[in-house]
Each structure stands twice: as structure tokens, then as C-alpha cells.
Amino acid sequence: MSHDAVPPGPRASRRAEAPKRGRKKEHKRRRGLKITLGVLLVLLLAGGGTAYWMFKDLDGNIKGVDINKALGEDRPEKLPTTGQNLLVLGSDSRAGAENKELGGGGGVSGARSDTALVVHIPEGRTEAVAVSIPRDTLVTRPDCVKADGSTMRSAERVMFNSVYSQAGPACVVKTVEKMSGVRIDHYLEINFAGFKDLVDAIGGVTVNVEEPIKDEASGLDLTAGTHKLSGTESLAYVRTRHGVGDGSDLGRIGLQQQFLLALLTEIKSQDLLGSPTTTYKIASSATKSLTTDEGLASLTSLSEFARSMNGVDPSSMETIMLPVAYDKQDPNRVVPAEPQAGSLWKAIRADGTIPESAKKSPATGG
């Protein structure tokens, strides 16, 4: 038998299979990098002078808040599993000429938390559920330590979105923990005015508008159908309320949930390894609009956390509004509806599946 006719042995077979295994590993590696907004690409290049400057620049963009120090030890217990709970706030400042042009008022000072999501990621990191807390929900604000070290005494029947402007992000976390019994592991705050640059950097976000929206207050005018929103249009989309449903905050929540998932899906689909320039632009826009707890307030920590979430598909994330009912004393406000709200928080505390009965909100007829 000639040399060419000798059948390949086990070693040769393994060599033949190696390229296939290598391609599979490369595919997995690329998926992991996409979800971190190219952060790992910057880390890999950090040995060069320019890349080091890029890394330090992005790292310096992220603002950190020491939530644990402000909250102390009187907190709910951690999940009995490796599940995670995140509080995601969309803070909105309407001050300045830019916001006046965007239909935000321009003359309104200060910032407020217009969007609040408790994102629960169960053990296994393959699915997630986001619970929206309506900004008009009446809650009991606990004793809180403000940023200047002074103490704000507890108060009942406080509108949820006023907690942020009155006492800061740590008090919002404490309020959520007290009302839900859910331990918040991480805090992320997105500045709405800043994230419009992120939307422009990724080339827009596609949303499906079920009914026409015309809101003179926000300047939004969309027909029913599919639209690719620019940064300015996206900001108006998450702010609008008068052109949706009955004009209450409950209608806006649905749009905000829809937009958040569309934004995450768009980011995950980007070929962030194809263009380092585009990657840096996206990462810069994202980090400039971001405030986190101290545990995530660095590019390394944030990228590691994002990489651990890579198995979660944004398109399959379940979005739920906290079950609420209209307040009997003030019909312009809502209160958590029981027993639905209690059942929802109990399921999250147990890292379990949320029952359908816990998703029904009397205020929306759902």
C-alpha cells in the first residue's frame, strides 16, 4: 500500500477535527464580546498607548454610587441561589436649551426617575423578567441618608418618582427593597438625555407602533407601523404619555418596556468587532449616560457582569407592570394591588416562576 493510501490514524483525525472545534470556539467568543459593547476589545488592546487612553477614557465615564454604605445592614436577604436582581432607573433632566428643543421643557431644574425596572435574572442566566414600577405609585419612603449625610425621615403616600429627586438613588433602592422585600444586588441608572447619542451611534432603534402617536408635548408624531427611531425621536418616544392610551403614566410604561428590549436587541446584533471606531463610539456613548453601584463602576467589572449575562436573550425577556389599582383618595395616583403585587414579589424572592395571577393589574384591566 502506498503512503498516500494509508488511512488516517486517530491522531490525524483529531487534527482534522481541530479546525471545526476552533471555529465553534471563535463563534462563542465573538458572541461574548458583542454583548459587552466592545469593552473586551478595548481591554485586549490596552497594551498600546492609544488603546490605553481609550480604556482610561471609557473607564472614567462611568459614575459610581456607594449604595451598600448608604443602606447599611437592615436589608432583605440575598437570593438563596445565584440569581440576581437589578434596579434600573431611567433618570430624566429636562433643564437646558437642548431639552427645550426636544420637547422636554428646558426650564425644569433637577432630575427625576421617570422609569424604574426591577430586573430579575434567575439562576442559570438564560432568561429574565423586568417589573416596571409606575412613577405615580404611592409608596412609603423609609428613613434615608441623603448624599450630604443628613437624614430624611420616613413618609407615607409619597409618589415613587419623587424619592429620587428628594433623597437620591440610594433611597430609591431602599424604598424598593422595603416595598418588595427583594434584595437589590446592583443598581444601574441611565440618563435619558445622554442615551440619545447611544441610539444615534448604533444607527437607530426599530420599534413597531401599534396605534398612531401624536403628542404635542414631546413632539412625537408617528403613524401605526414599523419605525426606525433616531436618538431625538427615541427620547421623545420614552417620554411621551399624552399620545398613548388615556394619557396616564401607565400607557407610557408599555412604550418604555418595548423600547428597552428593542435597544438591547439592537446592541446585541451589532457587529462590534468589525469596526473599532464604531465600537468605541458606542461604548463611549453608553458609559457617559451610565451610573452604577460601586460594584460595577469600572469597565472591567461592567464587562465581566455583561459577559455573565450573555445567555439572556433580550427578545425573550418578559416585561410586567407592577399590579396597581387607582388610589381611592386620589384617582390620579395608583397603589400596589393586593394580593397580586405580594405574589409577584414573593416569586422573585424565591427565584421562581411568576404565576399568571400575579401579573394582573386592576388599573389596566389586565
Image (cartoon, rainbow, N blue to C red):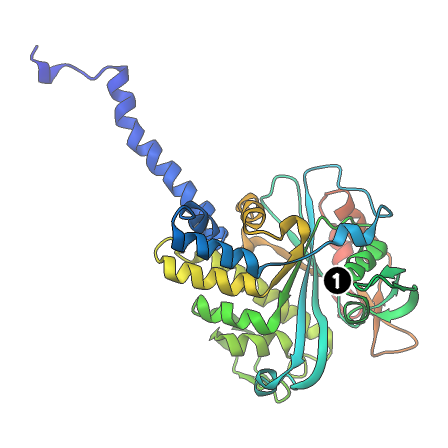
Residue at x-position 57% and y-position 76%: 235
Judge whether 198 appears above or below 211 on screen.
Answer: above
Q: Nearer the viewer, residue 365 or 347?
A: 347
Give how far across and how far down residue 325 sits, in percent: 83, 68
Which residue appears farthest toward the front when viewing the image? 49
Residue at x-position 81% and y-position 64%: 148
Q: Nearer the viewer, residue 198 or 234?
A: 198
* Quadrant in the picture for residue 320: bottom right
Q: Residues within 10 Å of mark 1 (few under 14, many from 20)?
A: many
Q: Which amino acid type corresponds to the residue marked 1 in the rendered image?
A: Pro
Which residue appears farthest toward the top when viewing the image? 1
Quadrant placement of the C terminus: bottom right
Quadrant placement of the N terminus: top left
Residue 314 makes an appearance in the image: yes
Q: Nearer the viewer, residue 279 or 25?
A: 279
Give how far across and how far down residue 170 sits, in percent: 77, 59
The answer to whether residue 128 is left or right of residue 345 is left
The answer to whether residue 33 is left or right of residue 247 is left
Residue 340 makes an appearance in the image: no
Judge whether 330 appears above or below 107 on screen.
Answer: above
Residue that carries the numbered disc 1 in the rendered image: 169
The answer to whether residue 313 is left or right of residue 160 is left
Which residue appears farthest toward the bottom when viewing the image? 216
Give how far across and how far down residue 362 sits, in percent: 80, 67
Q: Secondary structure at mark 1?
A: helix
Residue at x-position 92% and y-position 67%: 156
Judge whether 87 appears above or below 242 on screen.
Answer: above
